[in-house]
Amino acid sequence: MYSRRLEGSGLLLLLVLAGLQIAAESRGAPPCRPGFSEDLYTVTLPAIAEKGQPLFNVRFISCGQGALVWFKCSNPSDFRIEADGVVYAARTLQRAALPAKPLQIKASDTATRQEWVTQVRLTSPKQVQEVAVPAVMSEDLKEILFPSRNMESQLKRMKRDWVIPPINVPENSRGPFPQELVRIRSDHDKSRSLRYSVTGPGADQPPTGIFTIDPISGELSVNKPLDREHISNFHLRAHAVDLNGNQVENPIDIVINVIDMNDNRPEFTHQIWNGTVPEGSKPGTFVMTVTSIDKDDPKTANGMLRYKILSQTPESPSSNMFTINNKTGGIITVAAGLDREKVPQYTLIIQATDMEGNPMYGLSNTATAVIRITDINDNPPEFTVDTFFGEVPENRVNVIVANLTVTDKDQPNTPAWNAVYKITGGDPTGRFSVPTDPTTNEGLVTVVKPIDYEMSRTYVLTVEAKNEVPLARGIHYPQQSTATVSIKVLDVNESPYFEPNPKLVKLEEGLLAESALTTYTAQDPDRFMQQSIRYSKLSDPANWLRIDANTGRIYTIAVLDRESPYVKNSLYNATFLATDNGVPSASGTGTLQIYLLDINDNAPRVFPQEAEICRRPDPNAINITAIDGDLNPNAGPFAFELAHRPADVRRNWTITRLSGDYAQVSLKSGSLETGIYEIPIIITDSGNLPMSNTSYLRIKVCQCDISGSCTDQQHIMAAGLGTGAIISILLCIIILLILVLMFVVWMKRRDKERQAKQLLIDPEDDVRDNILKYDEEGGGEEDQDYDLSQLQQPDTLEPDAIKPVGIRRLDERPLHPEPQYPMRSAAPHPGDIGDFINEGLKAADNDPTAPPYDSLLVFDYEGSGSTAGSLSSLNSSSSGGDQDYDYLNDWGPRFRKLADMYGGSDD
């Protein structure tokens, strides 16, 4: 009956072993002994166990000693045991591949070094089904029994201890839900009522509500479809308590594995894969690897993928140029004939299928593999023509003569395409080079050394072209990789040149004018041109020379002097120009160096020319020498002697020769008066024809102090300040004083101009920096800044003593008695203020002396006899009665009001 229900639900449930109940024995039981609970364990393993999955546990009885026990299994490569006795899979295990012999587990006490050994027999699910299940299990649902609890140290050893295997539930189940999986039961439910519960992820922990348990019957159910790709297994813990909440059994662990279903297609990590392979590759050359991922269990057929190539584009030269490893996805070449110049790229459609490639049950997906054929140097460069031509003017460098063009079928701008040119013949002197144009790949035949038309009129070069990298194996350069370049040299007008340049001529100085010096001619390198050369002088610092324009003969036009400032180290340089008559003309320069030999043409002179000598306390002497512009032997040694005239020279002075170049002049006695004396000295050089010169030595004779210094006022002049220096100093002082005086005059004139401007322009009237105010009426008379009393009493300005009798100004105040204004009490009552104001107003109205006076006002009086009438109100009323003002109506609307006032009727 249970088998029929299992088939109807479609659940792949493994048989759950019930825990064996261990009953405590009577009071006369033997004492507790440490060791394993069983000598032999029987464990059911699933067909495939994942790495880290808990499989079973062995129970070790320590009898409350608290000793530290280490476990060790006989097959550590497949199983791993922890300190709590739980055994895990050390790797992914397949039950069929495990050895048939039992697994041995050893326990060791680290303190006493005592060891215990037990064995575990690994069985398959079919073997477990043959084992009798407890009678308490329901016929409809498998049961899991809680193992019996040990009562303190008393334990009845059983023959076996069953380990609860995991429960396998397939993913994506269609229900109906909830769907019962297993029943949890304790043998204590016979004597009392129990309540069952489960805890852990999927029950009371996120994700909650996936598994529930009936608290009374203990039936564990799943409430929704499971997804292995989301959660592959669940670890729950079952509990059994009484109605008071007291724990009846130790919690047991339940592992629920989600069985994979083929519900996911393979997915390529990239939809387009790019790879490269060199052209000409041999079969078996690796190209690239494509990978696909299937979310299903890779340990099952659902996640085992197989690859294959569906199509190849283009199918040239074969439709099967590549193949793929169906398991790894590696793509390799299987045929020869890859040629980038023919087919630069291939496109492959790759398919990945799960279920180990089963086309009927497996799910598949496709991706695109693009394979680019990379270039190798399998095509040499070839010249477009056999012979290239060019021409170049002579003596030109860095000029491109010809452009050499080549073709190369390899990929452009790669080392296999870039051309390298080399001259192999026709240029033994290295006058040409052929660099490569990086843009066009052309060879640029360039002149690097000057070419002489007179030496060679044509050049025939042999040039070969290669690539930057060698050709592929088995390929050679053809004849088209070599070309001939024919270059024609053009003749141009070249500059004449002097030979030698510079030219050195040695002669004695003093050569007279119009003497022939030498001939300095130039050569014309243009041998094939009939041209003439004319000469001219380009540089002659002393203007000593001239050159014949036709013959190049050089003559002197002045005496050559070695002592001239234009001669340096006896050498004089002159530059001449040679110009041909070509079109256009060309010219060249040559330098003539004249080395002048010295002759005795300069007489010596005394040095220094001024000196001073002490008269007292003791006469002293001075040392002199001679200066000669000539060179030895036309200079020293010199002969010094005093002149015979005047006669007192030899009487007061003596000269003594010290050496060939020096002599000493001394004062004979101290009787000579202080002053300045000029002593003539005859100096003769040592030339072949000696030259003598009378040179004057200016000596100041003075009184000296103890230190030997002159104390006379003329010391400054004798010490070296000549007349010219003193005059220069005086001129500088005068110029400085004139500048100071001019500056003072300029400052005074500037101050006067400022004062004149201030007098001419009043700051208040200067409209440049002032604000002008118009139509300002201001306040009353009390607000004005003047004394109103003077206006009210104008007679005080002109006393009666100086004013003629009977004469009064028209704008004076009338002579009337002063009216009596009401006096206000010191402390008036507020009610009397109105009366006081009214009385004051009446008094003012009746006061003829109160301003403004009803009298004639004088404005800008310029004398009597004016034909214009007065503009005052009195004169207007008296003199304008007979005037006809009707003409004002003809002046426009602006005068209409005035015409109404004066030209109207009395109304």
Image (cartoon, rainbow, N blue to C red):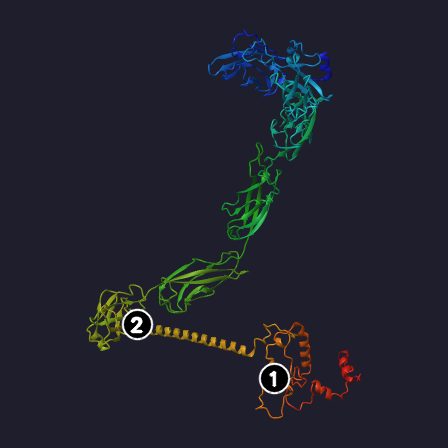
Can you tell which quarter of the image residue 24 is in? top right
Of circles 2 and 1, which is in front? 1
Question: Observer-nearest residue: 353 or 495?
Answer: 353
Q: Position of residue 42 (x, y in %)?
A: 60, 11
Residue ID at (28%, 64%): 633
Res. 348 visible in picture: no
Quarter the C terminus occupies: bottom right
> Which residue is label 2 attached to?
716
Q: Label 2 vs label 1: CA separation? A: 89 Å
Determine which of the numbered discs, if any, sits on residue 793 in the image: 1
Residue ID at (60%, 28%): 285
Left or right of 15 on screen, residue 582: left
Name the element at disc 2.
Answer: helix
Quarter the N terminus occupies: top right
Can you tell which quarter of the image residue 735 is in? bottom left
Disc 2 or 1, which lies upstream in sequence? 2
Q: Where is 150 relative to 757, above or below? A: above
Q: Position of residue 57 (x, y in %)?
A: 58, 16
Left or right of 876 on screen, residue 677: left
Question: Observer-nearest residue: 796 or 591?
Answer: 796
Left or right of 303 on screen, residue 471: left
Q: How many marks?
A: 2
Q: Position of residue 338 (x, y in %)?
A: 63, 31
Mark 2: give few (<14), some (14-19) or many (20+) Cα within 10 Å.
few
Q: Which amino acid type corresponds to the residue marked 1 in the rendered image? A: Gln
